[in-house]
Image (tube, rainbow, N blue to C red):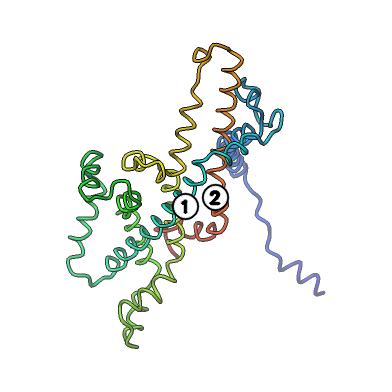
Amino acid sequence: MNARYATALKPARIKDSSGDRIFFAFCYSITILLAVIVLLPLIYVVSCSFSSGIAVSTGKVLLWPVEFTLDGYKRVVMYPMVWRSYANTILYTTGGTVLHICLVMIAAYPLARRGLPHKKIFMLFFSFTMLFNGGMIPSYLLVRDLGIMNTIWAMLIPGAFSAYNMVVARTFIQNSIPESLLEATQVDGCSDVRYFFQFVIPLSKAVIAVLSLQVAIAIWNSYFNALLYLTNDKLHPLQLVLRKVLLLSQISADDLMDPDDALALQGMADLMKYSLIVFATVPILCVYPFVQKYFVKGIMIGSIKG
């Protein structure tokens, strides 16, 4: 009897209509197509990095390493500028991300408060910077006049704040942290500073993780600010070293008398290029799994809440 009642209480499975099946098949097809488009270049770069230079330069590598070798990674590790630029990139990424998140959250919290005087005027100033900026030459002159050329601050200060990220953080605080929580803490004598650090920051882990990942990736991949503000090779980030390797790999057979030497040199330059690309991408790929759960939550910022 119990088994009969249990079977009767099971929810009936709703059959998908033909239209639903067509829609699901279309969605799966688009998803698989996008996955293939994203994965193919990655697989190609990784395969080239483990192949011989001649195989890479002659176009024999497709989706699997040809003449497996670690020569590219050995040359990358032995390249004198790689480790120094690697340390510079880690420093710029860590310092720039921490500074960026601190400034964004400090600005987002008061703008999320209902009782902030002249709130619309402040938002107007921030919104104006999202539409207009001084441009490259005024920015360069400003950095030069501040006396921070060829310093770490030239890589940290110009991108230390984003009005768009501030708006995202403000929206998250408004939608996720109720105003009643602030009122309850104020009854117990909690100050604004204590409320910000003990309540707002812990409850904003999702948006902080999302913004941190986005900012860190942008700083890690950025090279233009370094190209513009840094002339000292000791301060160059990893992306500038990669740019130099990419320029060195653009060698034609006419540059050398012997075509075989030109092919070998071209192959070694291409091999080092692909190896350095993988070498520069691995840290970001290692960090992403640890913030993925926050990234999924933060991506729903601004969605309709039930």
Residue 98 located left or right of residue 114: right
The residue pinned by badge 1 equals 90
Say which mark, if any, is on residue 75.
none
**Front-most of residues 236 and 121:** 236
Three-letter residue code for mark 2: Pro
Residue 30, can we see it? Answer: no
**Label 1 element class:** helix
The quadrant in which the N terminus is found is: bottom right
What residue did someone put label 2 on? 283
The answer to whether residue 30 is left or right of residue 243 is right
At 36% across and 66% down in the image, what residue appears? 173
Residue drawn at the location 42% of the way across and 56% of the way down: 211
Q: Quadrant of the C terminus?
A: bottom left
Question: Which element type, helix, strand or loop, lies under badge 2?
Answer: helix
Which residue is at 17% across, 60% downward? 121
For the point 28% across and 70% down, which residue is it? 113
- The answer, for residue 37, to whether it is visible in the render is yes
Q: Position of residue 252 (x, y in %)?
A: 51, 17
Please state the horizontal and vertical placement of residue 262, each as a whole percent of the image: 56, 17
Near mark 1 (Cα within 10 A), the count class, few <14, some 14-19 or many ≥20, is some
Q: Is residue 105 above or below residue 152?
A: below
Give the quarter of the image for residue 239: top left
Q: Are marks 2 and 1 in contact (CB under 8 Å)?
A: yes
Where residue 56 appears, as percent x and y from the top left, is 62, 25
**Which of the two labelled residues, at mark 2 and mark 1, occupies the earlier sequence position?**
1
Q: Nearer the viewer, residue 246 or 163?
A: 246
